[in-house]
Image (spheres, rainbow, N blue to C red):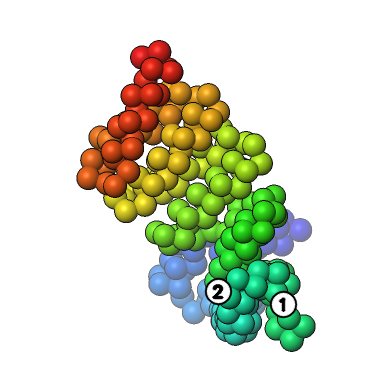
């Protein structure tokens, strides 16, 4: 019994500790391979299965993404033609963004469909539906991710959530901050903070435009609003 227990512990150590396995293979004798043949075969089988499984999953995701891209083509066409309901729900032959998200949401194209769906619902004045999709959209794209955060701010503002809107505009401004988009989002943040009666927050947003982006088109407006925010904040 003790002998079997020791063998099991030794087998587990081989499986769980790569250094032990490497040392045995490098410095051990042929006896090690013979004695642990079943353990090694099992280990290599697991590794092989993981590699094969990974390749199959990659191929599956690639084919899913291609299908989603094909489905997106017609939906984007309807979106650009301002046929928003058809773009969202489809035309009976082609899927709309809603179905594309449901069927291919984990793919890159499906993720992009979330952005389009959010924008379409926002244009229709369906602000909560817009938020549902825009909040689920995730990207490292400089333009689209910042834009998605700003649009979430727009939806919250329309829903009367002014403080939340301002915070989302600030988040958009700070996402890969740059001189082209950040000043726009900061100005929106300042105005939303003012609507929320958070004049210190507004002042912070306007100050950042003036100090960090003095050459931006928004800088002149920021200076005017800055003075007003200072007065209202009692500075």
Count of numbered labels shown in the rendering: 2
Q: Residues within 10 Å of mark 1 (few under 14, many from 20)?
A: many
Alpha-carbon span between mark 1 and mark 2: 14 Å
Q: Is residue 128 visible?
A: yes
Q: What residue is pinned by disc 1?
A: 90
Asked if residue 4 is positioned above or below residue 207 in the image, the reply reads below
Residue 97 horizontal/vertical position (percent): 66, 71
Q: Quadrant of the N terminus?
A: bottom right
Task: Write down the quadrant of residue 102 in the picture.
Answer: bottom right
Q: Nearer the viewer, residue 55 or 95?
A: 95
Q: Residues within 10 Å of mark 2 (few under 14, many from 20)?
A: few
Marking on residue 67: none
Q: Nearer the viewer, mark 1 or mark 2?
A: 2
Residue located 70% across and 83% down the image: 94
Mark positioned earlier in the residue sequence (1 or 2): 2
Residue 35 horizontal/vertical position (percent): 60, 75
Residue located 58% across and 79% down the image: 77
Q: Quadrant of the C terminus?
A: top left
Q: Nearer the viewer, residue 112 or 106?
A: 112
Q: Nearer the viewer, residue 141 or 47?
A: 141
Residue 154 horizontal/vertical position (percent): 56, 47
Left or right relative to 99: residue 109: left
Local secondary structure at mark 1:
loop
Q: What residue is pinned by disc 2?
A: 80
Residue located 65% across and 73% down the image: 83
């Amino acid at each position: 019994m003790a002998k079997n227990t020791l063998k099991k512990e030794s087998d587990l150590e081989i499986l769980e500790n790569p250094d032990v396995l490497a040392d045995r293979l490098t410095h051990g004798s042929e006896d090690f391979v013979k004695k642990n043949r079943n353990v090694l075969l099992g280990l290599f089988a697991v590794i092989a299965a993981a590699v094969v499984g990974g390749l199959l999953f990659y191929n599956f995701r690639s084919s899913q993404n291609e299908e989603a891209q094909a489905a997106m083509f017609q939906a984007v066409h309807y979106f650009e033609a301002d046929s928003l309901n058809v773009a969202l729900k489809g035309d009976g032959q082609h899927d709309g963004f809603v179905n594309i998200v449901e069927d291919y949401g984990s793919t890159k194209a499906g993720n992009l469909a979330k952005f389009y769906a959010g924008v379409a619902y926002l244009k229709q004045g369906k602000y909560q539906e817009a938020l549902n999709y825009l909040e689920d959209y995730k990207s490292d794209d400089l333009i689209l991710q910042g834009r998605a955060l700003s649009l979430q701010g727009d939806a919250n503002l329309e829903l009367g959530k002014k403080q939340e809107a301002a915070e989302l505009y600030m988040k958009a401004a700070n996402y890969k901050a740059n001189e082209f988009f950040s000043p726009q989002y900061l100005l929106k943040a300042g105005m939303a903070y003012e609507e929320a009666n958070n004049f210190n927050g507004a002042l912070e947003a306007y100050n950042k435009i003036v100090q960090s982006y003095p050459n931006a088109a928004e800088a002149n407006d920021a200076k005017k609003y800055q003075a007003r925010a200072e007065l209202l904040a009692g500075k």
